[in-house]
Image (spheres, grey):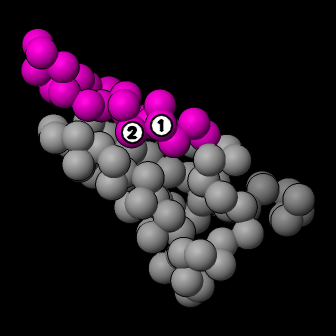
């Protein structure tokens, strides 16, 4: 994975959240860096001299669960409501 692709991981997350919320990415209420270290996330799957790293990171952001995979895939899913019906 190139440095350019790892740097777009965070942009991809912000764009997917904005699309699901039907707003411009600049209009999101919370910046992504307020919930996760974006520099660390971008570095996490960056290839090393021994080859690509592997793994998955999952975290919550603005009512969504974000999954970042070592394949460059980013999946953003609306978080399920609380079982008791509270919007909490």
Q: Mark 2 points at which residue?
A: 42
Label 2 packing within 10 angstroms: few (<14), some (14-19), many (20+): some
Q: How many badges with numbers are in the image? A: 2
Locate residue 36: give its quadrant: top right
Relative to 57, 65 lies left or right: right
Q: In this view, does 60 lie above or below 37?
A: below
Q: Is residue 12 above or below residue 15?
A: above
Locate residue 26, reporting x and y percent.
59, 75
Check disc 1 and report its element: helix, strand or loop: helix
The answer to whether marks 2 and 1 mark residues whose Cβ atoms lie closer than 8 Å is yes
Where does the magenta region start and end? 36-57
The front one of 24 and 78 is: 24
Residue at left offset 19%, top offset 27%: 47
**Per the image, is 47 magenta?**
yes
Q: In this view, does 18 lie above or below 53?
A: below
Residue 60 seen by the camera: no
Which mark identifies residue 39? 1
Locate residue 57, reporting x and y percent.
45, 35
Locate residue 49, reporting x and y percent.
12, 15
In which quadrant is the N terminus drawn? top left
Residue 73 seen by the camera: yes
**Per the image, is 43 magenta?**
yes
The front one of 80 and 30 is: 30
Which mark identifies residue 18? none
Locate residue 33, reporting x and y percent.
62, 47
Residue at left offset 45%, top offset 69%: 16
How far is the residue under mark 2 from the one under mark 1? 5 Å
């Amino acid at each position: 994975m190139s440095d350019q692709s790892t740097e777009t991981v965070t942009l991809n997350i912000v764009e997917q959240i904005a699309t699901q919320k039907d707003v411009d990415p600049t209009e999101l209420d919370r910046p992504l860096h307020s919930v996760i270290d974006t520099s660390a996330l971008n570095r996490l799957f960056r290839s090393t001299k021994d080859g690509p790293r592997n793994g998955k990171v999952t975290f919550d952001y603005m009512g969504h669960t974000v999954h970042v995979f070592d394949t460059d895939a980013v999946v953003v899913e609306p978080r399920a409501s609380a079982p008791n019906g509270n919007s909490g």
